[in-house]
Amino acid sequence: MDIKKEVDLYRDTPIRYLGYANEIGEAFRSIVPNSIVWLSYAVASGYVLADTINNGFKAYQDNVTPKATKNTVLSMTDTLLWQSFASVVVPGLTINRVCAAVQFVQKRSNNVFLKSKWIPTIIGLASIPFIIRPIDNIVEETMNVTYRRWIGYYPK
């Protein structure tokens, strides 16, 4: 018998890329004003909050019991932590450091082509698809052995 897992709109579809808006901002940090970078963080944070509210609503609907409020809060807390780390904090830091490393190499290079201000942006943008799944998996496993174990709650 094949058990089909429900598709999570916020994690299993292209909507997941909204959580990476801040990585696009980080990739463009050397070219655009800081206000644009912060706007990209606002978009990513909006995505995080939308998923948090959606999961809380689903948890509340699924638990028509005296524990409904507790399960809703646990679900929302879990989602908020997971999304904050998997969509904003870890990827933002990763892309920021990738771009900083490229700029470090650029400053020490004599190659005129490598001096282009677009090189860190291009490399930062190109690295985004490669970091999504590994970061998601690392955050998932880290939460399983820390936060989720401590509170005794594992999402469905």
Image (tube, helix red, strand yellow):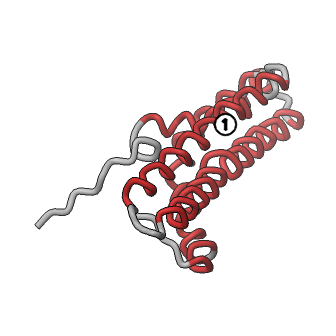
Q: Give the residue displayed 71% in from the left and 29% down from the top.
A: 25
- Picture quadrant where residue 118 is located: top right
The picture places residue 78, in percent across and down from the top left corner, at 57, 61
Q: Looking at the image, can residue 66 be seen?
A: yes
Please indicate, yes or no, whether residue 123 appears anywhere in the rendered image.
Answer: no
Q: Quadrant of the N terminus?
A: bottom left
In the displayed structure, does residue 37 sit left or right of residue 67?
right
Residue at the location (50% across, 65% down)? 71
> Which corner quadrant holds the C terminus?
bottom left
Question: Furthest residue to the front?
Answer: 66
**Residue ID at (33%, 48%):** 7
Q: Few, some or many C-alpha atoms within 10 Å of disc 1 (few <14, some 14-19, many ≥20)?
A: many
| Residue located beneath label 1 in the image | 23
* Position of residue 30 in the picture relative to residue 151 (left or right): right
Expressed as whole percent of the image width and height from the top left, the position of residue 72 reads 52, 59
| Nearer-the-camera pick, 85 or 113 | 85
Label 1, secondary structure: give it. helix
Viewer-closest of 98 and 54: 54
| Residue found at the far left of this picture | 1
Across and down, in percent, residue 62 comes to 37, 58
Residue 99's place in the image compared with 144, above or below, is above
